[in-house]
Image (cartoon, rainbow, N blue to C red):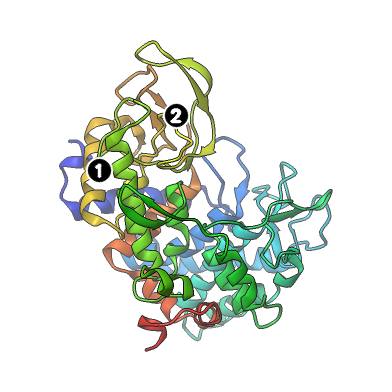
Amino acid sequence: MNLADLADDPLLNTLQRAAFDWMLDTVNPVNGLVPDNSDAGAPASIAVVGFALSSWPVGVSRGWISRERALALTLSALRFFANCEQGGDQTGTGYKGFFYHFLDMETGRRVWNCELSLIDSALLLAGCETAARYFDSNTPEEIELRTLSRGLVASVDWTWALADGGTLSQGWHPETGFIRYDWEGYSEALILYALALASDTHPIPPDSYRAWRLTYQWENIYRHDTLYAGPLFIHLFSHIWLDFRQIADGFNRDHGITYFKNSTRAVQIQSDYARLNPRGFEGYSADCWGFTACDGPIGAMHTADDTGRQFLGYTARGAPFGPDDGTIAGWAPAAALPFAPVPAMAALRHMLRGYPGMLRDHRFLGSFNPSLPGGGPEGWVCPRIYGLDQGLLVLMIENHRSGMIWDLMRDSPVFQQGLRRAGFKGGWLDE
């Protein structure tokens, strides 16, 4: 039986459980690290670790893992990051409370000459805070967990990463210093700024958040007034933890839109763009979309209709201004369920029926491209599973099903403080 033939709840339970089990099957229990992807020898991604730390409580609540095992995995990760090498050298784990983007799964040391990543550190810390909110018992282990989480949040020197214009840098290399790009334009950095503003030890000034907001791009697309960002993941990541349905900052109040409503419009724009299909790719329709950061075919190739196209590899695809090469992230509708449940579920079912090869063992592969010839209607299919996709599915499906992560994080004094300092008001912040 095709998964699309299941009723909503068993369908979502199957996909969510499969994504959860991927993280559970791949985590290193000694240090809590989780790999970036399914390739043999893949390093850990600190962002995926943050997603896993947020997912373990979901697994406990769903009966997929015992509280004791989830606690043990969480403590392994928090102890590792609390005690890792923070000297800023080329082979350490972090510096100034931040961490390198990719780490060796066994040693926890930097690999690939990667950057000290602000956003990925923020996603890791969001996972730490989720764990601290969930594991609230007065046992020695859960008290230790909360103490470690508080220490990791307090240790970050956010002011060190402020650029000359007042906004936050995107990252730093020990060999060359800060990346020349700062955060500019609406992005997943909402969660980053909330944490940086919330700090009791090294907070950035509220003017830094306002300076970032000045770089926003307000557009009218397909008759939708929207705060523009092309790749769908931008409209999802911060919303994993922060419930923006009723709270608003200065930008929201000026434009009469919440960030949650803006994500709803972004989903509609994805569907509209795929329906219009201005570049003529195979498979696109109002129920077949998913333009976001994902893997893809690369180089000049002949498509199924024997015309030539240039393909982009791993890139942040977006709608409607691109880039776009016919590659679709099949998991995108499931991750967007909290914002537009009816059209997202319709798209999910359509794609499951038409492109079952986008799954492996009920887990979404990174992407597919039906414009290229292949072994099935999916055409080209990404050969690997990505941890970020799996974590995003666990958490956003859970927010759709129960609101669990939002409920936990509304009680977080860290995020309450950060959001208030950013100028957010209303809803649960005023209760």
User: Would you identify the image quadrant in which residue 145 lies?
Assistant: bottom right
Q: Looking at numbered disc 1 in the image, what kind of residue is underneath it?
A: Ala
Local secondary structure at mark 2: loop
Give the residue displayed 37% in from the left and 41% down from the top: 290
Quadrant placement of the N terminus: top left
Give the residue displayed 49% in from the left and 58% down from the top: 52
Indicate left or right for 385 with 34 as reference. Answer: left
Q: Position of residue 173 (x, y in %)?
A: 78, 51
Disc 1 residue crowd, few under 14, some 14–19, many 20+, Cα 10 Å:
many
Placement of 385 over or under 146, stated as above or below: above
Give the residue displayed 39% in from the left and 35% down from the top: 328
Q: Of residues 58 and 389, which is closer to you in this image?
A: 389
Q: Looking at numbered disc 2 in the image, what kind of residue is underneath it?
A: Asp
User: Would you identify the image quadrant in which residue 208 lies?
Assistant: bottom right
User: Would you identify the image quadrant in which residue 172 lies?
Assistant: bottom right
Q: Which residue is mark 2?
A: 325
Q: Which residue is mark 1?
A: 347
